[in-house]
Amino acid sequence: MKMSSMMPDVKEVLISSGEIQDRVREIGTQITEEYSGERLLLIGVLRGAVVVMGDLMRHIDLPCEIDFMDISSYGSGTSSSGVVRILKDLEEDITDRHVLIVEDIVDTGLTLSYLRRSLLARRPASLEICALLTKPSRRRVELDVKYLGFEVPDEFVVGYGLDYDGAYRNLPDICVLKPEIFSSAPNM
Ligand code: 5GP
């Protein structure tokens, strides 16, 4: 594949697109086996989970629907505010459905722990979490992530759906940016 024009901004590739594809395929196979005979509703958390959702759902060989929620816990910077707001709610009624939340990254865990509690109140038949990435050293609340892609160190990562200030979501790899990219941002 041709090298991305964004690569000059990248300090390091942490997880290559090939490794991501292999792991997402494995997770899809595991989900297919564990939900065998069920109809699944995948809930993606906008906007970061869009890329992993698109790949993951094609490796789930079950009747499956998708829906999206938009939740805000971060501004355009790189640290958690701890504030969680629902910006866009689901279209689907999840009562008695088998629901799997699909998220890009679990950092403090505050976002998903809030989302999980609020979805449980709607009485789904089951509710589990799938996250592509986790930063265990940053966790502030306990959270059971049933399907997990990779652990990453405590660094701000971009690519494969994850942004910095709206950009870099379309990088195929999970990357760390050069420090000068952050220091030159107008709103930092
Ligand atoms: P938490 O509530 O777990 O602290 O934050 C989860 C959300 O923070 C993620 O869905 C993501 O939007 C954002 N986030 C946390 N760490 C990173 C990171 O390293 N890179 C990017 N781009 N977003 C992150």
Image (tube, helix red, strand yellow):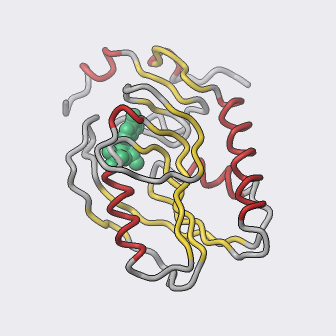
Side of 68 where 77 appears, left or right? left
Q: Is any atom of residue 172 visible in this view?
A: yes
In the image, 56 versus 182, the foreground residue is 56
Name the residue rendered at 59%, 66% in the picture. Answer: 42
Residue 182 picture quarter = top left
Indicate the position of residue 160 as horizontal and vertical percent values. 56, 38
In the rendered image, which quarter contains the N terminus? top right
**Residue 91 versus residue 164 in the image, above or below:** below
Name the residue rendered at 52%, 57% in the picture. Answer: 129
Indicate the position of residue 94 as horizontal and vertical percent values. 51, 81
Query: Count of labels shown?
Result: 0
**Residue 79 versus residue 95 in the image, above or below:** above
Side of 185 where 88 appears, left or right? right
Indicate the position of residue 188 as horizontal and vertical percent values. 19, 30
Residue 170 picture quarter = top right
Name the residue rendered at 50%, 84% in the picture. Answer: 93
**Residue 53 versus residue 177 in the image, above or below:** below
Q: Is any atom of residue 166 visible in this view?
A: no
Which quadrant contains ligand 1? top left
